[in-house]
Every structure is written in C-alpha cells, then in structure tokens.
C-alpha cells in the first residue's frame, strides 16, 4: 500500500537557520508532490507544488526538491522566523484529474527566537 | 488563490443528532470536492470524494449511510453526520481543486470542529 513518511514528528531550530523537512514515499509514482502549512485548528494552506519532471522549485524563502529515484522530497525554509512555526504536510498527487491528495502525518516545526 | 469556506466553524451537539457541514468554493467552480477528517496530531484522512451531480465515492471504512455527502452545485458540497456519537468528534475539512490556468492546486476550507457530547 502507499506510504508517506515525514522524517520527524517535530523539529526545533534557531531563528535565522535553515529548516529542512523530509518526505519519503513508497509504492507510489506521483505526478506531483505538494507541500502545505497547517496552523492549529485551521485547514492546510497550499505552499508549493513540484512536478515529477522538476528537480527544484523556489518561492521566496521556500525551496522544494523532488527526487523520483530516491522517492524523496526535501522542503527548506531559509532564514527561518518564529512566524514559520507550524505543521508542514507533504502530499502526493496521482495526476491532473480528480484523484485526491494523500497526506503525510506532518512535521511540527518550532522556530525559536 | 482560490477561497474555500466552511460553515459552521465549530459545532457542539448531543449524541444521536445529525449535523450538516457546508463547503463552498467562493470564486471558482469545483466539479470535485474532497472531505477529510483529522484527529489530534494525526494526518488528514480522506473520507470521500464528492462529485457534482453524482454519488460520492467513499474511502474504505467510511460508512456512506452515516456520512451523507451531497454535491448539488459546482460551488457547494455538504457533509451530514447522521446520528452522531462521541467517537465522531473530530476536525472535518473540505477541499476543492482549482484547475484554472492549468494548475492543480487543492484549496482547503478552514475546517469544522465537531464535538459530540
């Protein structure tokens, strides 16, 4: 069965450092991989989407890589700020049709001032 | 980005009652919406896929007679939890895809916190 693992349940880093979150998957060949941010008591908010033929994508302080050979995505937040503290979810997407996203359990990031 | 709303944001009900949750796409049409459930410190678990004008597709283990889904229009899907019990207490989140511009982003509602006493 499909399995998505986000390497750690919680990650604490110092303000200004780069946070790196990992998402690994098995038994799946996603066309897209997406990253979301979720704050307590809120729905997830879309951050970035990367396609299977893309190696890297950037958006402001965010960077996502996608290695379909390793079946892994890395999510980086550079110059992290306390406001970046949240749970980050990776999600796999089958195709451009109507298949639902499959989510990992998320990594709770805490940026300490 | 596209906006998805949910109503109510929070509901407390007695065991045995039914609760309806609405999900609306505010500035785009969504032929497909998804309903998720999330327990504390857990991931989002897909309950069903809601297709406009047709029956919903439920995930394994989700009782279709207990969780009634209606997708009456391109901007509205409803989830009704029938005869709710305390174990149904959870955070329910809907989402919809916005395919404009060739994107495949999925936008989520703010969620509905259901507490069954």
Image: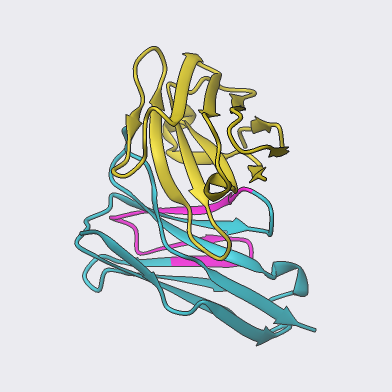
- Residue B84 lies left or right of residue B14; in this view the side is left
Q: What color does chain A have in the rendering? A: cyan
Residue B80's spot in the image, x, y percent? 53, 27
Q: Report how many numbered discs are placed on residues in the image.
A: 0
Q: Considering the whole magenta stretch, tell me its main secondary structure.
A: strand
Residue for point 37% across, 70% down: A5
Residue A72 highlighted magenta (yes or no): no
Above or below for A15 versus B49: below
Determine which quarter of the picture holds residue A82: bottom right
Chain the render paints yellow: B
Determine which quarter of the picture holds residue A7: bottom left
Residue for point 32% across, 38% down: A99
- Foreground residue, A112 or B82? B82
Residue for point 45% across, 24% down: B69
- Magenta-colored span: A43-64
Residue for point 71% across, 32% down: B8
Determine which quarter of the picture holds residue B26: top right
Residue A55's spot in the image, x, y percent? 35, 64
Quadrant location of the C terminus of chain A? bottom right
Residue A49's spot in the image, x, y percent? 45, 52
Residue A110's spot in the image, x, y percent? 68, 77
Residue A59 highlighted magenta (yes or no): yes
Q: Would you say residue A17 is visible in this rendering?
A: no
- Foreground residue, A73 or A55? A73
- Foreground residue, A76 or A111? A111
């Amino acid at each position: 069965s499909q399995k998505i693992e986000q390497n750690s349940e919680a990650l604490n880093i110092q303000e200004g450092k780069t946070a790196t979150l990992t998402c690994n998957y098995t038994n799946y060949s996603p066309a897209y991989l997406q990253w979301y941010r979720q704050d307590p008591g809120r729905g997830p908010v879309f951050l970035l989407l990367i396609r299977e033929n893309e190696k890297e994508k950037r958006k402001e302080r965010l960077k996502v890589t996608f290695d379909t050979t390793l079946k892994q995505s890395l999510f980086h937040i550079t110059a992290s700020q306390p406001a970046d503290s949240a749970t980050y979810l990776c999600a796999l997407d089958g195709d451009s049709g109507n298949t639902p996203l499959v989510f990992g359990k998320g990594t709770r990031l805490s940026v300490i001032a | 980005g596209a906006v998805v709303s949910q109503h109510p944001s929070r509901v407390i009900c007695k065991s045995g009652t039914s609760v309806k949750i609405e999900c609306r796409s505010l500035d785009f049409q969504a032929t497909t919406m998804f309903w998720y459930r999330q327990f504390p410190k857990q991931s989002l678990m897909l309950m069903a896929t809601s297709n406009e004008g047709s029956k919903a597709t439920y995930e394994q283990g989700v009782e279709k007679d207990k969780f009634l889904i209606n997708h009456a229009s391109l901007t509205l899907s409803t989830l009704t939890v029938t005869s709710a019990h305390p174990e149904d207490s959870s955070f329910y989140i809907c989402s919809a895809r916005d395919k404009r511009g060739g994107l495949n982003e999925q936008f989520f509602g703010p969620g509905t916190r259901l507490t069954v006493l």
